[in-house]
């Protein structure tokens, strides 16, 4: 049976890329001393651009430019100016999309032009190359990514592969490896557009600034098909196909990759330092939806077009605002649109500000700065232009000066595109709604709607204005892809102890009305009902009850999962009263300073408002600063109270809970609750807590969602989270069958440490126990974070905390140091600390066993004797195995022969134990004997008068018993010393990958062996061992 290896996955990747039209080259072959050299000999592997290919491409794509101009273009491209990688990458992105500005002296003076890096019209005119094992050296570090994709000699993509058949070689390891490459060989990533990680079955793509949680799958090839990865339980729809095949064929097709790099990558910058720059790239749903929308736009704006482009329905949290930006950027650049004017419509000022902020942060994509209409007169001025412009406005600014008047025509042009954010029927009525005024002002404009919620089934106006759906991306797909997390619904109404007469009643008619409703006639009809309900919701008694429950709920949530929460109140008065009630309970959460404090109110207002409200009414700039604080996961601001603000278009990934105490329904409710569905590290889901009885409103909103063809639930019932928690809890409990952990749960620290050591011993004694336990507790911890503070979750809180402590201690005591990075990743899930235990330290199992943590190189007989006497045999075995494994890995970097010998001895002992040939006590004895041998091996070099490098070569020569007898120690020592000196002088970076360089070293080694009379029959084997030893030592030499 053929085994899948990492090399096999690499070769398959190259085959797929070759079928896509890429030339395939082996990295060492194009090295400066390779078979077909393309790299600079003087650069010694520090060069990352294939200059010859770049120059040829520039000449081919820009035939009118003279040699001097091409030289300047090459110089500008290959000499980054900033010490910041992300700044250099951003500069390169502008060169790629906008060309390189160059000047040269012509016969009649200085000339200016642009040099284009790629031929965007004819992809075949570009140079497409995939190189495997491409060596880069920087800062004395040598690294070799698996596959690098070059377009016109520029390394635009890096692919890191792992073996799907190796359970330790995960795509998370591949991600970590890319982060190491970015740190150690940043030059390669100056030109990077895409980072790809895969084990063949799973595949993810991200950018230079993408965290692990933002590396996303690519699940389609043509945009009409859908695939799912083998064994991926999260993905339900689509045909099963290896994720890597789908991603390569769907993303790296030459036409699509060019389009993607030029139109679907952007840099968001909030004006801070370079650390605040985020490089973002489109997901597959955004890429194909935008391209379909562009096609529909060209049809709608043509002479025969009906000016209805359509509606893009992408569920909240899946990047709708960014999709709108990509769409605007692409139609602006499309020559068929003849420099259009783009108008972005919202229905509220705060939404206008939020969306304007997104577009402004991505102005490079738009090739211009967007502008915001200040008033009706300013809007008319901005639209009275001949072409161009990205204009933001609220829809109300299209009202005529006097009610009943017709809005004057502002422009008859057909190349005006109106993008409406969250279109719905109240705004787009052609008879007496805002759509009529829009049409009067811009009679030939075309309309497109972007929405996070579907068009309601009885809404005839929205399709009349915008047309049919262009693309749908529903909740099910978003959660499956990891674009959003699921939302859980919890009603706390029963906890508010009010009699029936005191409880507010919300009927369906009332759901859509809010205190800030713009439609005056409707507001008048509902004013009295609003006032009566607001009075009941805002009673002092009720607010006190809600505040007390909310504080307890939030604090319990925070113990399990760190994050932020939003409190939504019915009126500004209730916002202020709720704030006062909460800080009465938690005075230390309050601060008069806007830059401090754990709770704030964000609301609008004026000087005429009540005095008690004034400290909460801030300027627009102050509210923006508050939003920045709230979005910072590390800032102490955890709770914000709002009435209408931040309920749509506001992104705070670390927000995990929303407390609803305001009547809402329909798309307003769906929009609001989606604030908690953003991905953040390992956040398993968001929570909506209802204090007003909105379950029926949610059901009505969801019925419209499913009727429109959407899949997936808007919210999951809290009981579903409890069911999952109890199931995962039973899995862990069952693992302790036969071991009573109950006495440990609330035991004092000293007793708890001993108990945890015993629990670890028990788990390690189970078949595959450690692996199963680590996985089971990880899943349980996430389930607990979703379920808390339900009574059934709190009832097992201390047990879950104990399970987590045992898990952490197992990791600490048994997982090799080289593997711990995966265990120590950033997380939102918190380690529970039992309320009965004062110590919060993870149990140090050495201390629990009464031992000092040893240094393997100086393992004392006393320490080994103590280990041998430990009553927990399985634990003693794991400790020794971990210590010896870590030391063998360290020695493998220095002395191959010695490390391999010890590794074989360790493996043999463990295999005998696993096959039950020997008992735990016997294997411990063998490992202690091995530890002593390793300790003694450290002294051999000193005893022989050899350095570490020399003893490594000496061991390679000493493998041959006949050589030892014939030559003796003194001669072998001389050979080892000469080998070190000669090899060290002769090796160069990447010599191991160049056969001619290896051949030279091999000849030199053989000459030295012959010189000292090394037995001829063993010279070949000794030579290969010496070469292998030189390979590992070379890394040390080049890095020192």
Image (cartoon, grey):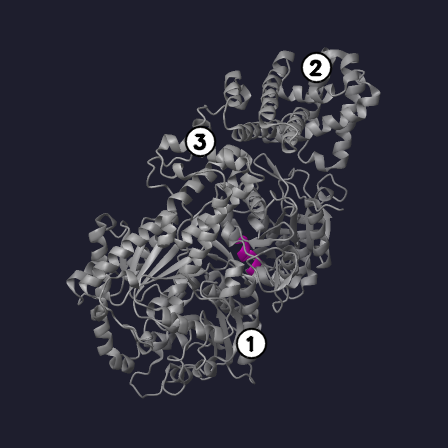
- Crowd tier of the residue under label 1, counting other residues whose Cα lies within 10 Å: few below 14, some 14–19, many 20 or above: some
**Res. 208 visible in picture:** yes
Examine the residues drawn in magenta and state their main secondary structure.
helix
- Which comes sooner in the sequence, label 3 or label 1? 1
- The Cα atoms of the two marked residues, 3 and 2, are separated by 44 Å
- Please tell me whether residue 534 belongs to the stretch shown in magenta: no
The residue pinned by badge 2 equals 973
- Quadrant hosting residue 146: top right
Q: Residue at x 79, y 22 (%)?
A: 1007
Whether residue 18 sits left or right of residue 170 in the image: it is right
- Crowd tier of the residue under label 2, counting other residues whose Cα lies within 10 Å: few below 14, some 14–19, many 20 or above: many
Choose between 446 and 690: the one closer to the eye: 690
- Which comes sooner in the sequence, label 3 or label 2? 3
- Quadrant hosting residue 334: bottom right
Measured as percent of width and height from the top left, residue 148 is found at 64, 49
Which residue is outermost to the right? 1017
Whether residue 121 sits left or right of residue 742 in the image: it is right
- The Cα atoms of the two marked residues, 1 and 2, are separated by 79 Å
Q: In the rendered structure, are the residues bearing label 3 and label 2 in contact, judged by CB atoms less than 8 Å apart?
A: no
The residue pinned by badge 1 equals 296
Foreground tag (3 vs 1): 3
Residues drawn in magenta:
91-97
Locate the C terminus and report the quarter of the image it occupies: top right
- The Cα atoms of the two marked residues, 3 and 1, are separated by 63 Å
The residue pinned by badge 3 equals 844
Q: In the structure shown, which secondary structural element does the residue marked by tag 1 occupy?
A: helix
């Amino acid at each position: 049976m053929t085994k899948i290896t990492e090399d096999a996955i690499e070769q398959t990747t190259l085959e797929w890329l070759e079928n896509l039209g890429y030339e395939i080259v082996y990295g060492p072959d194009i090295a400066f001393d390779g078979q077909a050299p393309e790299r600079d000999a003087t650069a010694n592997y520090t060069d990352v651009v294939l200059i010859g290919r770049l120059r040829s491409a520039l000449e081919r794509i820009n035939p009118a430019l003279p040699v001097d101009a091409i030289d300047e273009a090459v110089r500008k491209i290959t000499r980054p100016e900033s010490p910041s990688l992300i700044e250099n990458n951003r500069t390169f992105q502008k060169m790629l999309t906008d060309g390189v500005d160059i000047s040269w002296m012509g016969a009649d003076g200085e000339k200016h032009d642009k040099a284009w890096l790629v031929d965007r019209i004819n992809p075949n005119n570009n140079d497409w190359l995939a190189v495997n094992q491409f060596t880069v050296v920087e800062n004395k570090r040598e690294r070799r990514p698996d596959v690098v994709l070059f377009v016109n000699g520029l390394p635009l993509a890096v692919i890191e592969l792992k073996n799907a058949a190796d359970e330790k070689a995960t795509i998370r390891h591949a991600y970590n490896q890319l982060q190491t490459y970015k740190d150690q060989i940043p030059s390669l990533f100056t030109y990077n557009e895409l980072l790809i990680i895969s084990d063949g079955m799973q595949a993810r793509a991200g950018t230079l600034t993408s965290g692990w949680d933002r590396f996303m799958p690519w699940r389609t090839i043509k945009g009409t098909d859908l695939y799912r990865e083998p064994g991926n339980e999260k993905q339900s729809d689509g045909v099963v196909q290896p994720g890597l095949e789908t991603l390569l064929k769907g993303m790296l097709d030459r036409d699509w990759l060019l389009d993607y790099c030029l139109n679907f990558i952007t840099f968001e910058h909030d004006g801070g330092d370079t650390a605040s720059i985020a490089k973002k790239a489109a997901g597959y749903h955004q890429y194909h939806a935008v391209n379909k929308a562009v096609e529909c736009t060209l049809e709608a704006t043509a002479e025969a077009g009906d000016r209805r482009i359509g509606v893009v329905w992408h569920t909240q949290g899946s990047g709708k605002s960014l999709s709108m930006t990509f769409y605007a950027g692409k139609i602006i650049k499309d020559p068929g649109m003849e420099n259009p004017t783009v108008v972005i419509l919202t229905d509220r000022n705060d939404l206008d500000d939020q969306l304007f902020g997104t577009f402004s942060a991505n102005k490079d994509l738009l090739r211009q700065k967007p502008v915001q209409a200040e008033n009706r007169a300013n809007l008319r001025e901005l639209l009275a232009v001949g072409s161009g412009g990205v204009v933001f406005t609220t829809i109300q600014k299209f009202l005529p000066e006097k009610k009943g008047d017709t809005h004057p025509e502002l422009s008859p042009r057909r190349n005006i595109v109106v993008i409406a954010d969250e279109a719905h029927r109240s705004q787009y009525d052609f008879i007496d709604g805002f759509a009529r005024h829009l049409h009067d002002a811009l009679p030939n404009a075309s309309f497109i709607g972007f929405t996070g919620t579907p068009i309601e089934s009885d809404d005839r106006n929205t399709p009349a204005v915008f047309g049919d759906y262009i693309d749908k991306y529903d909740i099910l797909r978003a959660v499956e892809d990891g674009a959003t997390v699921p939302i859980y619904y919890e009603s706390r109404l029963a906890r508010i102890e009010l009699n029936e007469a005191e409880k507010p009643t919300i009927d369906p008619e009332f759901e859509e009305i809010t205190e800030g409703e713009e439609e005056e006639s409707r507001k008048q009809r509902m004013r009295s009902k609003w006032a009566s309900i607001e009075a009941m919701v805002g009673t002092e008694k009720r607010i006190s009850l809600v505040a007390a429950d909310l504080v307890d709920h939030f604090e319990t949530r925070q113990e399990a999962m760190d994050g932020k929460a939003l409190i939504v109140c019915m009126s500004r008065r209730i916002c202020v009263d709720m704030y006062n009630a909460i800080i009465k309970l938690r005075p230390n959460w309050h601060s008069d300073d806007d830059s401090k404090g754990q709770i704030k109110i964000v609301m609008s207002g004026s000087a005429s408002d009540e005095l008690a409200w004034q400290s909460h009414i801030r300027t627009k700039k102050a509210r923006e600063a508050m939003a920045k604080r709230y979005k910072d996961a590390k800032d102490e601001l955890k709770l914000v109270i709002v009435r209408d603000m931040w309920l749509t278009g506001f992104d705070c990934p670390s927000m995990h809970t929303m407390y609803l105490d305001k009547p809402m329904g329909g798309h307003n409710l769906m929009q609001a609750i989606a604030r908690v569905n953003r991905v953040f590290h390992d956040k398993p889901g968001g929570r909506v807590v209802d204090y007003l009885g909105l379950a029926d409103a949610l059901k009505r909103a969801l019925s419209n969602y499913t009727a429109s063809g959407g899949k997936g639930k808007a919210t999951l019932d809290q009981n579903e989270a409890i069911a999952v928690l109890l199931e995962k809890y039973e899995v862990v409990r069952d693992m302790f069958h036969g071991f009573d952990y109950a006495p440990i749960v609330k035991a004092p620290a000293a007793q708890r440490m001993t108990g945890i050591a015993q629990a670890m011993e028990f788990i390690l004694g189970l078949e595959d126990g450690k692996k199963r336990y680590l996985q089971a507790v990880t899943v349980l911890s996430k389930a607990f974070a979703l379920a808390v503070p339900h009574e059934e979750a709190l009832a097992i809180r201390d047990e879950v905390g104990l399970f987590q402590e045992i898990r952490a201690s197992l990791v600490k005591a048994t997982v090799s140091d080289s593997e711990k990075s995966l265990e120590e990743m950033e997380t939102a899930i918190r380690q529970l600390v039992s309320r009965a235990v004062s110590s919060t330290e993870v149990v140090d199992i050495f201390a629990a066993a009464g031992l000092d943590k040893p240094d393997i190189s100086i393992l004392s007989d006393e320490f080994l004797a103590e280990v041998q006497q430990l009553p927990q045999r399985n634990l003693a075995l794991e400790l020794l195995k971990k210590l010896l494994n870590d030391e063998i890995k360290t020695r493998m970097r220095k002395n191959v022969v010695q490390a391999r010998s010890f590794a074989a001895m360790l493996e043999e002992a463990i295999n005998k134990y696993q096959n039950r040939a020997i008992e735990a006590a016997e294997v411990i004895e063998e490992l202690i004997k091995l530890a002593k041998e390793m300790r003694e091996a450290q002294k051999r070099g000193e005893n022989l008068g050899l350095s570490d490098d020399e003893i490594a070569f000496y061991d390679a020569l000493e493998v041959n018993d006949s050589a030892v007898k014939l030559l003796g120690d003194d001669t072998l020592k001389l050979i080892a010393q000469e080998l070190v000196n000669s090899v060290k002088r002769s090796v160069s970076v990447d010599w191991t990958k160049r056969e001619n360089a290896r051949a030279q070293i091999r000849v030199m080694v053989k000459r030295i062996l012959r010189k000292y009379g090394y037995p001829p029959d063993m010279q070949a084997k000794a030579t290969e061992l010496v070469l292998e030893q030189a390979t590992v030592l070379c890394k040390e030499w080049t890095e020192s």
